[in-house]
Structure formats: structure tokens, C-alpha cells
Amino acid sequence: MEQSSATQEDIDFRAPAVRGLDVNDIENIIERRSWPRFGDGGAPPAMTSTEEIFIEDTKVGRDPWRTCGRKGHHLTSECRFKDLSDSVSRHMAGTSKTGGYIRTGQRYEAKQFGRSEKRPMGNDINEENTVRVHNLTDDIHGPDLLKLFSTIGAVNRVHVAVNRNTGMSRGFGYVNFVNMEDADRAINELDEYEYGDNKILRVEWAPPSAKAFFQSAS
Amino acid sequence: MRPILMKGHERPLTFLKYNREGDLLFSCAKDHTPTVWFADNGERLGTYKGHNGAVWCCDVSRDSRRLITGSADQTAKLWDVKSGTELFTFKFDSPARAVDFAVGDKLAVITTDPFMELTSAIHVKSISSDPDEQTAESLLTIKGPRGRIQTAAWGPLNKTIISAGEDAIVRVWDSETGKLLIESSKETGHQNTVSSLFMSEDGSHFLTGSLDKSAKLWDSRTLTILKTYVTERPVNAVAMSPLLEHVVIGGGQSASEVTTTDRRAGKFEAKFFHKILQEEIGGVKGHFGPINALAFNPDGRSFTSGGEDGYVRLHHFDQDYFNIKM
């Protein structure tokens, strides 16, 4: 017991640096507080920000989570896909290969329509089968929506609105189904579905103006 | 946290410095008047009028009585902190860039830019406690590095002077003889202009920020690279927390690209990294342009950033900041 305390004292426990202020420092500070203002001093040019600023998590390039393939580590109980039906989970498992470069021809849109098939142009889209999805978190992009809505039925096109300046999602998008019934089912099943960071997905019939989005995207 | 916005400068900020006790904050900007603020509430104590060009750098003596500033008007000036009166002017033939008081405040290092056919130089001046006895004589002038010397600082015990600049090489000079002792290698060191340097409190290590989008932590004596912090944007300013193992790195795209990019895409944020783990902790946003200057309050409980937008933002940390676990 005594030996161990002796070795403790042998270790150099130097204070990393002298911190804090002594009495003289405090007196100096108080004195400086009452110094007369000079030059342009005195006028109150300072104001407190009305905006609350946080230290934001800005990490980039985090590894995808192994179960659902989404970016960012989270517990399975917090996984946004945990409540999806089995068919969805299976679908997710089948396509969970994320990351890596995908050749242009093999990206999700091309896969969907195959090369031999005629790819529907903006004009061919039956816009009546389109649903509008909003309340998306900004890390959800087209492929994510496609994955989710493909579990309902065949999807023609997916478009997530992005801010042209920043490239960030504006939080809503459109999904165009091949069949009207699937679109109807999507509204029934995925409206108020919890998707993303505790956000409740809203799915509704798209206004006719949605067609413009697909045209601009095509 | 709700930062305090200090609007006093009309041009981009260039440098920020706290005094030792952390109650005064000195700011330099491209307008010609360095300014001193109370660091708790952001009230302006005064301005130092007399320079006729952008002020690039400043340093304050340990007793908070003297201020030295380096300016593009080819002078470095000594000021009385309390009254704002100009005590002495060092005249050069090219713009003064970096200034730093040595430990003890008896010496100061001033660097000058290359100009016309002059090369850049590091000058060591003796500082008298009585301003009437002050002379302009240089104790030592070091020439050699090509390109602008962006930053210079005294090494441990005033035995060395550490300089870095446009040629991306960090150099350690003997402060008595002016001999080059060590220089960083081109391969492992920075790849682009070193924009800022921050010496640790005890002088054992220092942090440099570079336009090669990284910041590096160096051993002051051996000049070995201890850590590297990588960001996505050129680094203009660096600082180290005196309290926690945190470093903060500020930067942004170059000023000429700012007008063509959206504010939210510009990454104009101060980024916090864990000093040892080199892991990013988070970012503090707010400036409308790149961050040019950063300073930590010596008590480690607040920090300030100065931006291209002319604002100084004073952030008092919330309790959350001290609870961050890595």
C-alpha cells in the first residue's frame, strides 16, 4: 500500500499550465472596465444575434449503417426502416449495396426502364398517377424515395426538388407510378409514415403543376 | 448559443487577439483602424487611429499596456492600449505583415512583404518600456525565404522564431544569430500558402492553417508533424482551446468566388476538431463570408471569429459544449 503511494509521487503530475486569474489580474480587469472610451469607442455597435447558433454536426462521409444501408450510425431501434413491412425489408436488403460508382447506364432510372424499352419522356408521363411527398429530411434523394415507393408498385419516375444554388434537398418530391392504383395505395400506406430523422412523411395527390418538375428533370 | 455581433469594421477582418486576462479583444481589419472591445459584452472600448492602410496583425503585451500593429502602409506602430495614442512608428520599405511580442515584451518580431525588388524579411526589434527611448533599430534582420511571410511567432524561451508563408514551408530560425535551424519538408508539410499560425500557451507546439485545406499541429523544437486536420475549404485561421483538447479552424472559399455561390453552400463555418483524435466535432455557422480570423478566450469559455463580412462574432459557449463526448 505504501509502496504504491510512493510510485504515485514519482510520476510527474505537472499542471499543464497556470490557468485562471490572480487577485491582481481581477483588479486590473475591474480598472480597465472603467477606462474612458476613446476614438470611436462607447457607441454600442454590438448586438446579440437573434438566431440561436448550435455547434452543428458537420461530419461527412460517414459509413453506411450495416442493416439498412443508410448513412450515419444509429441504433436499430432508431432505424427509420425498422417498421417497414417484411416485403420492404427484403427489398431493402436486396438493394442495400450503397456507395461506389454506378455507371450511368446502370443507375436507378436506367435500370427501371432498361435500355431496350422506350424510356418515357416527360411528355409521356401520366401525371395523374403522381403523388407529392413532403416533409423529407434533406439527406433523402431520388434513389431513397425510389427504394421506398418501389415496395408499393412499379414506379415510373422519382424527383426530389433541390435548391439550384446549394444542391440541397428542398424537402419535397414527386413520385410517378405506372398504375393509378399503386399511387392510391402509396397515399394510404405511406402517408404519416415515419421516415428519416423522426419526420412524418406526408404523401398526397400531386397538383397538376408537378408535371413541370419532371420535365425540368428529364 | 446566441453570438454577439460586433459591427465596427467596414472592411474584412484580418486578425483577432485577446489580452492575457481575456477581458479585452483586439481586432484588425482592412479598414485602417484596429479596435479594442470588451470581451464579455462586445462593447467597443476604443479605436487606434493613425494607420493609413490595411492592418494585418497585432499583438498585445502581457500587462495589456502596449499594442503593436503591422500594416500595409509600410509601418508597424506601438500604441498605448488605454488611451489609443500612438507611441512609436517603425517605418519599413514594404508592407508589414506579422507582428509578435516575445515573452517578456522586450523584443518584437515584425515581418515585411516582398515589394518592388525587396525580398521579404523578418525584423527583430527591441521594445523599451519607456516609449521615449524607443529606437527603430533592428537587432536582427533575416532574409531568405521567397514569397510573402504570412506569419511569425516566437518559439519557446524566445530562442527561436518560427515563420511560415507563401512558399508553404515552416522555418525555425535562431533568434540571436538569424541562422536557419530547421525547415519543414515539402513532401510531408503543407502544399500551399500557410495562412495562419497559433502557438500553444506553453510554446511546446503550434498549429498552422494552410490554403491546401488542412491544418497541422507541429512540435516547436523538432518541427515534427504531430497531427493533421483536413477540411474541405482553404484554411484562413486557426486557434486552439486553452481549456479542452479542441482546435478550431476557420476558412472558406477565396473572396473572389463568394459572390457566385450561395451562402449555405460556401461552408463559411468555424470547424471544431478534437486535437488528439483529429476527429471533427462540429461547425459553427453564421458569417456571410469566409472566416479570416479566430481567437479563443484564454479561459476557454468563449471564442470569436472575424469574417470577410466585417463582423466579429463573439460566441459564449453553452453548457452543451463542455459536455461533448468523443
Image: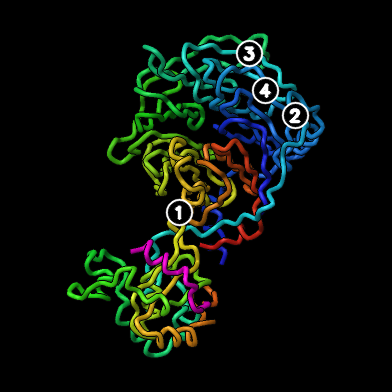
In the image, what residue occupies the spot 36% across and 33% down?
B168
Residue A92 visible to the viewer: no
From the image, state whether disc 3 or disc 1 is nearer to you. 1
From the image, state whether disc 4 or disc 1 is nearer to you. 1
Distance between mark 4 and mark 1 Cα atoms = 40 Å
Judging by the rendered image, the residue that carries numbered circle 2 is: A41
Distance between mark 3 and mark 4 Cα atoms = 13 Å
Check the picture and name the quadrant holding the N terminus of chain A. bottom right
Q: Are marks 4 and 1 in contact (CB under 8 Å)?
A: no
Looking at the rendered structure, the kind of residue marked 3 is Phe
* For residue B251, above or below residue B130: below
Q: Quadrant of residue B13?
A: top right
Q: Say whether mark 4 and mark 3 are on the same chain.
A: yes
Judging by the rendered image, the residue that carries numbered circle 4 is: B48
From the image, state whether disc 2 or disc 3 is nearer to you. 2
Secondary element under disc 4, as helix, strand or loop, is loop
Q: Are marks 3 and 4 in contact (CB under 8 Å)?
A: no
Looking at the rendered structure, the kind of residue marked 2 is Gly
Looking at the rendering, the stretch of residues picked out in magenta corresponds to A202-218
